[in-house]
Image (cartoon, rainbow, N blue to C red):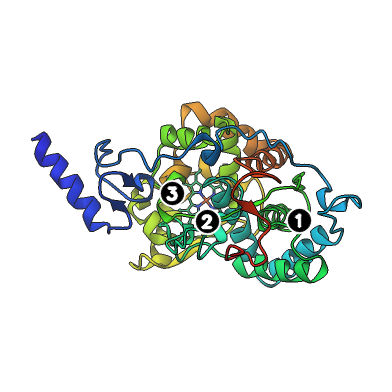
Amino acid sequence: MATKLAAIIVLAAFLAGPAACEGASICFNGWMRLPTFNPRLCARGPRVNRWQRGASPAGLGLSYGYYDNRRSTSYCPRAEGIVRGAVREAVAANPGIGAGLIRLFFHDCFVRGCDASVLLTTTNSKNSDTEREGPPNKNSLRGFEVIDAAKAAIEAACPSRVSCADIVAFSARDASYFLSNRRINVPMPGGRYDGRESFANETDQLPGPFSNVTELQASFAAKGLTFNEMVTLSGAHTIGRASCRFFSSRFPEMEPAFAAKLRAQCNGNDNTNVNQDDVTPDVLDKQYYRNVIDRKVLFTSDAVLNSMETMTQVIENANRAGTWERKFEKAMKNMGKIGIKTRGDQGTEIRKVCSRVNN
Ligand code: HEM
């Protein structure tokens, strides 16, 4: 019986596609719907050391106004202003790009630390199967063109001084600011250096939409973030969009009118995208927590926050003005410290073009 069940699970994983589960060593468990969790099928991902995983977000080496110091070789006083201008323009044209930039920061920091590895298309080891190709990112991440535009303008102003990793972090801060109608202002230090490697299979460190509370907690803890920070950062699902394939199995568990509306929007097509927050889709606000309580959220990973361990925080975030916003600012700042590389670290550089290593 047990052997039969295991065989069914392997088959399910296989049908989900090779990208979902390669061999027995890498498994995007939270990113696919499996009948049950099988530890043998979803064994540990590739071995990465503590530095790469960034177990503790200490952030030593970062400082505020990093590019404003006249005596530093990193002096580039216009850098943060250029990023802010690019993000302002992009968000005004399409708020969804702002959502994309916030997510880009999360996906960068959780894999090899905040080192802009998420932007690479080729790397030092000539690997082209980079994070961008990983199942959580492929055909899903957006906002790359904003980073590229900001980088090009910054390179014109002060070549080889401002890292792509800092541009990603500043963009997330600025997108949060504009999308929250200037209510959220993340204090974001600079000084990160860019990495030179990126691997698609390492994106299995990102939690997936089918993750439960234990899995969510574990993935955040592996990056040195707390359980409360996990609940706080999930509030970013009050903006942006999501693909029907990640939640269409959950219609029966959702509030009926909400489920009916989504069912009509998806119309049987798993690749259709819908707004994550049906109430204020383009505003970074605490509405997400009301939606959790009302069973009007999309993913399993959102819905599980309606549980004993997380309920106190969810209710407080939903009801007390300003509470979530202040926690979000701190948690974003902490996320920006994960596994950072700074001046003098091996295998780092200030990239000239964000999608490729210098040589
Ligand atoms: C807690 C675990 C999380 C899971 C399982 C998760 C999963 C997902 C998934 C599946 C999507 C939809 C992607 C698509 O359909 O293409 C999404 C969208 C999004 N996520 Fe998360 N996410 C998590 C945490 C976060 C965090 C920490 C942030 C940022 C602080 C974030 C920000 C966003 C944003 C802004 C979008 C919309 C992106 C867009 O419209 O382009 N998420 N997330």
Query: Which sits in the foreground, 8 or 339?
Result: 339
Total tally of numbered discs in the picture: 3
Rendered image quadrant of residue 3: top left
What is the x, y in percent for residue 256?
41, 51
What residue sits 74% from the left and 46% below the top?
A: 186
Identify the mark nearer the N-term, 1 or 3: 1
* Callout 3 crowding tier (Cα within 10 Å): few <14, some 14–19, many ≥20: many
Residue type at mark 3: give it. Glu
Residue 255 in view of the camera: no
Relative to the observer, which residue lies in front, 154 or 299? 154
Cβ of mark 2 under 8 Å from ligand 1: the answer is yes
Residue at image position (90%, 50%) is: 71
How crowded pointer 1 is (Cα within 10 Å; few <14, some 14-19, many 20+) is rated as few
* Residue with the mark numbered 2: 276
Disc 1 element: loop
Judging by the rendered image, the residue that carries numbered circle 3 is 202
- Residue 244 shows in this picture: yes
First in sequence, mark 2 or 1: give its number: 1
Quick one: SS at disc 2? loop
Q: Is residue 78 left or right of residue 287?
A: right
Q: What's the distance in space between the residues labelled 2 and 1, CA to CA?
A: 18 Å
